[in-house]
Amino acid sequence: MNTRTLVILSLFVAIGAALHFIMPGIYMGMKPDTMLAMMFLGIALFPDKKNVLLLGLVTGLLAGLTSSFPGGLIPNLIDKPVTAFVFFGLYLLIAKNMSNLIGVSILTGIGTIVSGTVFLTSAYLIVGLPGPFAALFGSVVIPATIMNAVAMFVLFPIVKTILKRTNLMQQAS
């Protein structure tokens, strides 16, 4: 694993953590997970199993520590690594067959839905839910899906261009 890659991934995680920390809980203590977009950005730009594992674990820990959901640490520690590898697998399957920008944006939406489902299911089984599953899913996961897909559509080409212009993408790979 390259030091430059680690630094770039750390920046993505830090930005995601800051966004997640300031995002208010919107329904029953649950907040849209803005860290996911940054985790998915890191995976799409540096698709490697080690990077995916590292991003999943660190993002899960930081999301759990900044969660406003009651008992949200453990579900986040389960959710993020699972979601990271699901996104990675899907990314590898469609990366060659679809426009990168459209494909990554769609995968971000799918990944956010997977994350929300795994989070709510694990929270239900471990600590219980403060409200109905469908209400939490509809009021938090669906808006987060749209928000993350739009954020990826805007951020992906910008970050990819910056990394190419500074030669960080070629050096980090």
Image: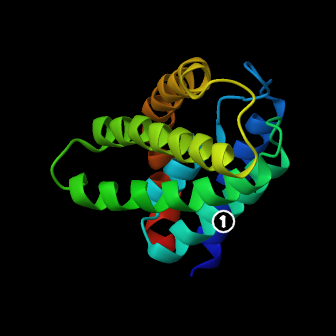
- Compared to residue 2, the image places residue 71 above or below, namely above
Looking at the picture, the colour scheme in use is rainbow
Residue at image coords 45%, 30%: 149
Residue 56 position within the rendered picture, expressed as x and y whole percent measured from the top left: 60, 61
Compare residues 160 and 95 and report the one nearer the observer: 95
Compare residues 26 and 131 and report the one nearer the observer: 131
Compare residues 97 and 115 and report the one nearer the observer: 115
Could you tell whether 92 is left or right of 6 in the image? left
Q: On the image, numbered disc 1 is attached to which residue? A: 57
**Residue 167 visible, this orientation:** no
Residue at image coords 41%, 54%: 87
Compare residues 55 and 140 and report the one nearer the observer: 140
Q: Amino acid at mark 1?
A: Leu
**Residue 145 visible, this orientation:** yes
Kindly indicate the quadrant of the structure image that contains residue 51.
Answer: bottom right
Residue 68 position within the rendered picture, expressed as x and y whole percent measured from the top left: 83, 35
